[in-house]
Image (spheres, rainbow, N blue to C red):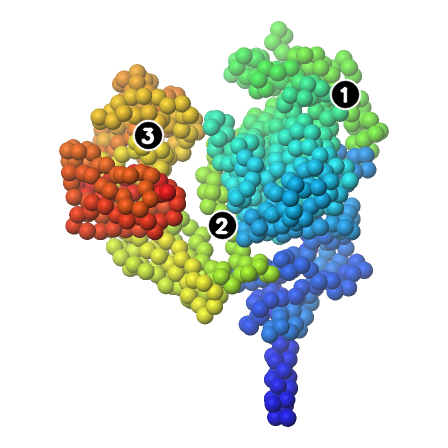
Amino acid sequence: MLKKLFLSLSFLLLAIVVKAQAVTITESAGWLESAYIKWTPVSGATSYNVYYTGNGITKKKIDTQLIRSYGSYFRADVLGLAAGNYTVSVAPVIGGAEGTLTVSGNIAVAAHDRTGFAFSGGYNPSAYNLDGTEKSNAVIIYVTQNTKNTVSLTVTGATANPCVGLQTILEGFKKGKDNRPLIIRLIGNITDLSYMQGGDIVFENNNNVAGSITMEGVGDDAVTNGWSVRVKGMTNLEVRNLAAMNCDSIAGDDFGLQQDNDHIWIHNNDMFYGNAGSDADQVKGDGAMDVKGSTFITISYNHFHDNGKSSLLGLSENTTVGLYITYHHNWFDHSDSRHPRVRFYSAHIYNNYFDGISKYGAGSTEGSSLFVENNYYRNSKHPMMVSLQGTDVWSPGKMMNDPGNQGTFSSEDGGSIKAFNNTLDTDIATNDMRFVPYADPNPAFNITGVINSTTDFDAYVPATRAEQVSASVKSKAGANTYNNFDTDPAYYVKNLVPDLPLAARDKTIQYAGRDFGGDLKFTFNNSVDDTAYLVNQALKTAVSNYKTNLVFVQGENSAATTQTLTSSTNNSQTVAANTAIDPMIFTYGGDATDASVSALPASGITFVKDTTAKTITVSGTPTANVSFTVTTSGATGTPVSLNGTITLAGTSSGNLIQNFTTDGKVSTFYNISGNINSTNGSTTYDGLTLTTRLKIETATNITYTTSAISTLTLVFDPGFALKIKLNGVSYNANNGVVVIPNVPAGANSITKGDTTNLYYIKTEYNGNLSVSDAFKNKLAIYPNPVSSVLNFTTSDDILRVEIYSMSGALVKKFEAKTLKSIDLSSLTTGNYIVRAVTKQGSFQKMIIKK
């Protein structure tokens, strides 16, 4: 009896505790067919239940994967909502019992804009209904960084079931045998999957009209990081609410519609820099949104962030029949060109915001027909152009047409543009916004014997939207005419009432990109960036170093990962003597209640811990090289660590050498941005045979920081006698070699003067004994690749050996009076940098660990 009474009291006490523990909602809002809620964690809660009510739905529970921890708060997203008003409620689960529900205030949800050719012919390209709710028989899979290679689904018609991994699941749909709508929900920052196709996730369904696939990001932080989306042989596909960044796939496009696709809807995505390609015009990555061999496409509400080539449309279709696409409410945010660049297609381009475009907006070639209406152009150079006529070939310097030098579109035949009611806002007027309407009497467009606006024009501007363009209006090259697709009653365009340009601009700014603008926001400096073609280094750094704040997804086995440690700054820094480092801020969270720092303070570097903010800040002015480790601790979860390295520039007293033949682009001294030539050359220098070479082109930039006056030696192709630039000053080569004495201490930059190839760089501090002179025998490291023991041969004693990861983190250190070999058997497979330190200086080489 006493035992029963004790148990009853225990359950009563637990019920009282659970009842008392309610969450505190900190934020809630509605978006496009979705809503979200945030709350602070409840002590003792093992999970949370989230429900929504509204539009005839009462307390419907959401999938547990939609609930995520961000350390100091939780967030849940409710997807698949029809437009209307909702409330969202959340309760903690403690000891298996649900606690008190906390209910949000009213949340208003808006509908997506389903306008455009993707919906022509009664098609719905989405796995959602037209009201935004899930189709009745839709199947949903969740893909996270932890599950991307293990998520599974049984697919009708697949070669083998279950299909395991995202790409394998999609290949199950390739034959078009499974008609179920498929919803793929991506959560968090997802890097390369173990199985892809040439670095892409590829969608195919054998043009199955009965099927449909939606791939969408959850919340404001879903990222395809390093990989891209490629589509071929696909009917009915929607891709939304994703950020594409750092793409390095073979195809190279953030999103690429490759061939034989129809009824595709790509919307509300953020498109950031891809990795630099091999061509000079790929420094910002290849295409952001390219479309080839596809029709009935809608590209809408996407945010293009300084993309070099935003959207190529058409390639080798060789027909102007049956190719239809819509671009609307896209924010071309300081992107350079191709908005879009069109061959063959009929393209409706309306209500977009062209914001500080440095090259050109839309370009028409090869008989394409573009209806460009109600767009807002702010300080955008050359809003519209047709190949080999008008602005495309006008030379303001020569005040005449100059097709040989000014043509933008590979000397292709022209197309046709009908332009109506666009706003051309010159704003700060740093761009020459030249636009030539057909038959405009402006004297600047009609110069006898030079230019005539009836042949050299950018677009035909009608008196009314419904006016058809006469067949007498032809392109100068190819005599192509406008096909008047916009007045065809078979298509939505004829009866569409678009937003006015100013309203379109404001709506685009509000809704383009991911939910509420996404988690990576960047504001351009219009006075500089409106005219800039080059990579914005601040944005590039933010994209390259992007890290998610997501801690774990509810429902996954998160026990091993609930202790978290993140850094918002560069953990591997090289600074000049007497220069402070940028503070390194480490934040611990999840189940981590504390964190410690090993090897600090040391050599001028210290740290400060803020237990309230759960941060550790490392700062100071180094007097020597420093390496340290931050490690979390807590009662539950597995501790995690991050390493930091601080290198004092020029601490070696000898030469700092970059030999591209042995080391590639890997260096702890030189920061090398550029492309290795795929073809080897041959030259000799310092007794070395050199073959691998770095292209010296516009995209190339090599920076380094010296602590004293130095001499710079650069070895180029044999016979090269033209110029290279150091810190903006040109220097001539003598038989392929440039020697620049007395380079002042500080930051230096090597850039293109003339096109060539670079084999070898040497920085030698003046007055110091060089390593190559000090060593009678060259340093040898063997075997390479290495399985266990790495040996050294040199005439000088090796005092210290440091092993660095390719990201610059120190992973091992060996010290002795003399080192002849080191044991690397505990290293994981991969590439590493070995730095050997002697009394005379240091050498570094790249090794491969088998």
> Could you tell me residue 261's position as x and y percent?
70, 32
Mark 3–mark 2 CB contact (< 8 Å) = no
User: Is disc 2 placed on a helix, strand or loop?
Assistant: loop
Viewed as shown, does residue 177 lie left or right of 847?
A: right
- Quarter of the image where the C terminus is located: top left
Of circles 3 and 2, the one toward us is 3
> Could you tell me residue 38's position as x and y percent?
61, 61
Q: Which of the two discs, 2 and 1, labels the residue nearer the N terminus?
A: 1
Q: Nearer the viewer, residue 664 or 172?
A: 172
Question: Within the image, what quadrant is residue 740 found in?
Answer: top left
Q: Residue at x 62, y 18 (%)?
A: 387
Q: Which of the two discs, 1 and 3, labels the residue nearer the N terminus?
A: 1
Instruction: Name the disc covering residue 483, or none.
Output: 1
Instruction: Name the disc covering residue 547, or none.
Output: 2
Task: Give neighbour class at mark 1: few <14, some 14-19, many 20+ (Cα, 10 Å).
Answer: many
Instruction: Name the disc covering residue 661, or none.
Output: 3
Q: Is residue 573 visible?
A: no
Cα distance in 3D space between marks 2 and 1:
48 Å
